[in-house]
Image (cartoon, helix red, strand yellow):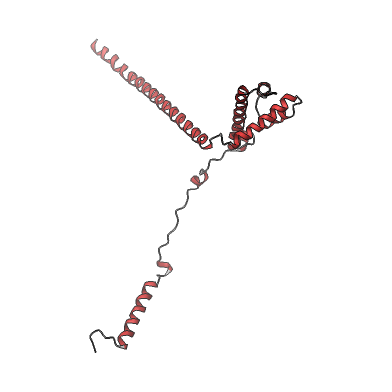
Amino acid sequence: MSAYSTTPAMAAQRKAGALSSSHRNNTRPPAAFRRVHSRPRQNTKQAAHAKMYVPTDAFGGLNPEQVAANVLKKTTTLASMEVIRIREEKETPEQPSYQPLNEFMEENPYRPASAWTEKLTSSEEGDLKTAANTLFCTREEYLAEGAIAWDSVKASTVNSLQEEDAELMREYMMNSMTLSMGDDLEVAETEEEPSIGKNKEDNQ
């Protein structure tokens, strides 16, 4: 028998040892001795302010997004009127649309948008009806071409607000420092006055 030969008894012993080792590795400790990994509790105040809530009655039943949409609708309408004006300057149509639209907007302020549009379309004047149709077609064309860079609108709004807030905060800090320095000077002058008067009495 060679030194590296294995007897049946030795093979059985090795198998038993391997099973025992596998059993030890796969055996989990009792539940009482396991470490419980609990998730940190979320602060209820942080959860409540995760998204700021704006009541709808703050804008007459509209949310901030709807208010912003109305502003963009007016901007799109005014931009479309400028497109019509430029086109008519280059090539005068048989029935111009810009002048009647401009006169109508001067007489009827653009607010709210739905009421303004309804009043425009309900006009009995023939030239204004044609101008209204031109305006609506131009608006659709303006939006279809992607003339409004929505990402730029968002970035411009955020940057403008941040710059304005930073400037207001600087002014607030400067005013606070100025007031604080003025109060400190008044306190210092008040503290010096009695000592000066006492020195005069001592000299006499």
The x, y position of residue 16, in whole percent, is 35, 82
For residue 109, above or below residue 150 = above
Image quadrant where residue 22 sits:
bottom left
Work out which residue is located at the far right of the displayed protein and give it: 124
Residue at point 63% right, 26% down?
A: 84
The x, y position of residue 64, in whole percent, is 58, 36
Residue at point 34% right, 19% down?
A: 190
The x, y position of residue 93, in whole percent, is 67, 24
Which quadrant, please, contains the C terminus? top left
Q: In screen coordinates, is 175 left or right of 85?
A: left
Which quadrant, please, contains the N terminus? bottom left
Q: Nearer the viewer, residue 177 or 154?
A: 154
Visible residue check, residue 80? yes
Residue at point 58% right, 34% down?
A: 68
Q: Nearer the viewer, residue 19 or 6?
A: 6
Q: In screen coordinates, is 141 left or right of 23?
A: right
Residue at point 59% right, 28% down?
A: 79
For residue 142, above or below residue 33 = above
Q: Nearer the viewer, residue 111 or 106?
A: 106
Visible residue check, residue 115? no
